[in-house]
Image (cartoon, rainbow, N blue to C red):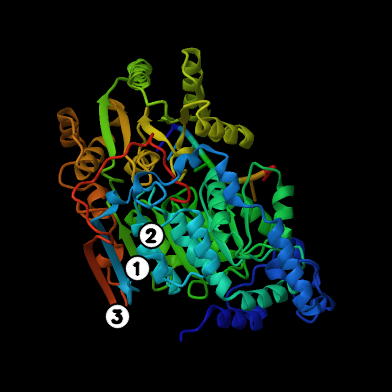
Amino acid sequence: MTMSWADSVEDSNHGWSRSTRASYVPPPLRTKGFADPHSPSYDRPSRGGGGGGGGGGERRSKGDRRRAAANRESREPNPFDLSDKFAELVVADEGGNGGGGINFDAYEDIPVEVSGAEVPPAVKAFAEIDLGEALNLNIGRCKYVRPTPVQRHAIPIAIAGRDLMACAQTGSGKTAAFCFPIICGIMKNRSSFRAKGAAAAARWGRNVACPIALILSPTRELSCQIHEEAKKFAYQTGVRVAVAYGGAPMGHQLRELEKGVDILVATPGRLVDLIERARVSLKMINYLTLDEADRMLDMGFEPQIRKIVEQMGMPPPGARQTMLFSATFPTEIQRLASDFLSNYIFLAVGRVGSSTDLIQQRVEFVEEMDKRAYLMDLLHSHRERGNHGKLALTLVFVETKRGADALEHWLSVNGFPATAIHGDKVQMEREKALRLFKSGAAPILVATDVAARGLDIPHVAHVINFDLPKDIDDYVHRIGRTGRAGKCGLATAFFNEGNLSMAKPLAELMQEANQEVPPWLTQYAQRSPYGGGGSGGRNRRHGGGRFGGFDYRRDGSSRGGNYTTSSYYDSGYPAYASVPCVYANEPVSASGWD
DNA sequence: AAAAAAT
């Protein structure tokens, strides 16, 4: 048996004051005698289930605890009732594929690459893993019948306690892939966690939440979404989930934290704030997940993430389990990310760089001044084509916040019910825009890159890149807002002389995804200064046009002794003769999917 | 050059 997390925490608890890794002390606690385990406050019992792990259990009788637990569970709102109020419920079990509306046929013969030392084998069914009864019930309530490809590979790896860098196509079930093992692990080791949590709470103060798992994401809306999903997965497991993000009043979030939290979902800024106010401690973190990890580690974000992970008291790699997930993983980001990982497994599932075959991609040459007229034509033609009365949403991406407001206004003036989301709006407006869009009240959403990643909006039939992004990976994430859960989608991009740098990567991407590349784009691609002899980063980082992910360690020398690479086509399900194409405006249950 | 993330 390898050293367990509990052992390592034991170590760090005993040696905390003389640890080589500087112990983080938040400013409010620096003058107090908080740090002395023998200080008078050490044995003080805490009330409720407060602090980190349900602290101060020793003084309560078994009956008390049972009543408290029962009380907590009876108060826990049923997250499944809530989702029923929304359109997603149309879901039911259509199509007879038994996947809660998920088109599994589209996921056979998925290319998979796994590398690392001693890789745990994939599973074909949830039942092959002992996730526990409560979690299995929730899987049923979510109407998940079989695991998606990324889940089939990632869950056994995560359950085995291994660090993971996972690259999976957009809309392929990543949230559940990291939530299930975390919830399962917390349940299995609950008594040990609770005891440590009580000790930590006693030492750090009762108002310091000491989560066991931390899930970081790059936008507030994405954190909300992960929180909602995680609550479903954790329903009646006793595992407590909370969320912390900026732009919202801190009071409510603080009250939730005070009730005790096992899994904290957060955006970086608010989390740092909470840590510095000594309302959250990372001392007890056993699981760290970065969602949209490549975004979290890019230029603007990386220093903040590094601060949280390396300088705010979190156990180091090896003493915690770290899992990074994204649809794209450039080599430079992999190199950065390896600082946070220990003997990790690299996993790539699906045609990562090209999203999926399920998204039909088109590029039109449109001059800047013609874009609005062209957009109007597109919107008209789609309106007239009719959607059998079903919801068909259109997501329009623009480059700037000002541009988003301008286009929203122009669309509204011209009779199109549109709304807009971007980072200059206050959080209330952002959430309202998303709500209007999801419900169909405003079936057109104009957005900046704030909406490019991870957001799971059912019924997005069409993504329009009104302005192309500068980076091909951003393009991949944007179009991934459609074609989710195995459904088809359409993505249209407006290209002009201002997008020359995108010509080559875009043409290559479309070719990889078996899309029709217009001859004029091929010509631009050949003329492109970034093109020529394959000097572009794309081939290198996406494995030379085969399919998505590529473990950067393969061309380095930093591998361990048992390092192996397997690359194969994996069909976890009985094969079907054809891959039926279900459109995104069909009823879909995509919840919990990405 | 732009966007996101704390107040």
Label 3 to label 1, Cα distance in Å?
25 Å
Q: Which badge, 3 or 1, is on the more N-terminal residue?
A: 1
Along the line of sight, the residue nearer the viewer: A296 or A157: A157
Q: Which mark is residue A123?
A: 1
Q: Which mark is residue A561?
A: 3
Residue A122, quarter of the rendered image: bottom left
Q: Is residue A390 above or below residue A236?
A: above
Subunit that carries the residue with mark 3: A
Do pointers 2 and 1 mark residues of a single chain?
yes
Q: Label 2: which residue?
A: A147
* Direction bottom: furthest residue: A1
Along the line of sight, the residue nearer the viewer: A534 or A146: A146
Q: Which badge, 3 or 2, is on the more N-terminal residue?
A: 2
Q: Are marks 2 and 1 in contact (CB under 8 Å)?
A: yes
Label 2 to label 1, Cα distance in Å?
8 Å
For badge 2, the amino acid type reads Pro
Element class at badge 1: loop
Element class at badge 3: loop
Q: Which badge, 2 or 1, is on the more N-terminal residue?
A: 1
Along the line of sight, the residue nearer the viewer: A272 or A73: A73
Element class at badge 2: loop
Q: Residues within 10 Å of mark 1 (few under 14, many from 20)?
A: some
Is A359 situated left or right of A304 in this image?
left
For badge 1, the amino acid type reads Val
- Return the x and y of residue A24 as percentages of the image width and height: 65, 68
Q: Residues within 10 Å of mark 3 (few under 14, many from 20)?
A: few
Q: Residue at x 51, y 70 (%)?
A: A132
